Amino acid sequence: MLNIETLGFMGGGLVAISLLPQVIKSFRTKSTKDISVLWGLINLSGQCFWITYGLILPSISLVVMSSITFIMSLSLVLLKIKYK
């Protein structure tokens, strides 16, 4: 039977990698015109809450995967600022 943290890593991993194609495309094309800054800021705020929640539980999978997702979202926001 799967450990509950394993499920957390699996789900969090899929969510984190879902942003990877957009980060790569934005970096390669130097274009972020279709990315909303508001979306990025809301997503970053949400990830901060998930990280905090994971620390309180404590849930290592939630903290690690939300941190990775935070980094991916932050990358998109920074690319948006850089390439407008």
Image: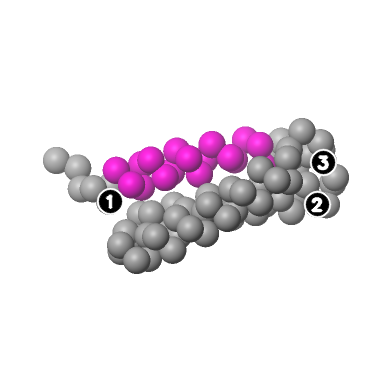
Mark 3–mark 2 contact, CB under 8 Å? no
**Which residue carries the number 2 mark?**
81
Tell me residue 16's x, y (percent).
50, 44
Three-letter amino acid code of the residue under disc 1: Glu
Tell me residue 37's x, y (percent).
73, 46
> What SS does tag 3 mark?
loop
Three-letter amino acid code of the residue under disc 2: Ile
What residue is at 59 percent from the left and 53 percent from the top? 44
Three-letter amino acid code of the residue under disc 3: Lys
Tell me residue 52's x, y (percent).
44, 63
Tell me residue 59's x, y (percent).
32, 59
**Which residue carries the number 3 mark?**
30
What residue is at 66 percent from the left and 37 percent from the top? 22
Q: CA distance from mark 3 to mark 1?
A: 37 Å
> What SS does tag 1 mark?
helix
Q: CA distance from mark 3 to mark 2?
A: 11 Å
What residue is at 85 percent from the left and 45 percent from the top? 84
Secondary structure predominantly adopted by residues drawn in magenta: helix
Camera-side residue of 54 and 20: 54
What residue is at 54 percent from the left and 36 percent from the top? 18
Camera-side residue of 59 and 68: 59
> What SS does tag 2 mark?
helix
Report the side of 21 relative to 64 (left or right): right
**Which residue carries the number 1 mark?**
5
Range drawn in magenta = 7-23
Dot 1 surroundings within 10 Å: few (below 14), some, or many (20 or more)? few
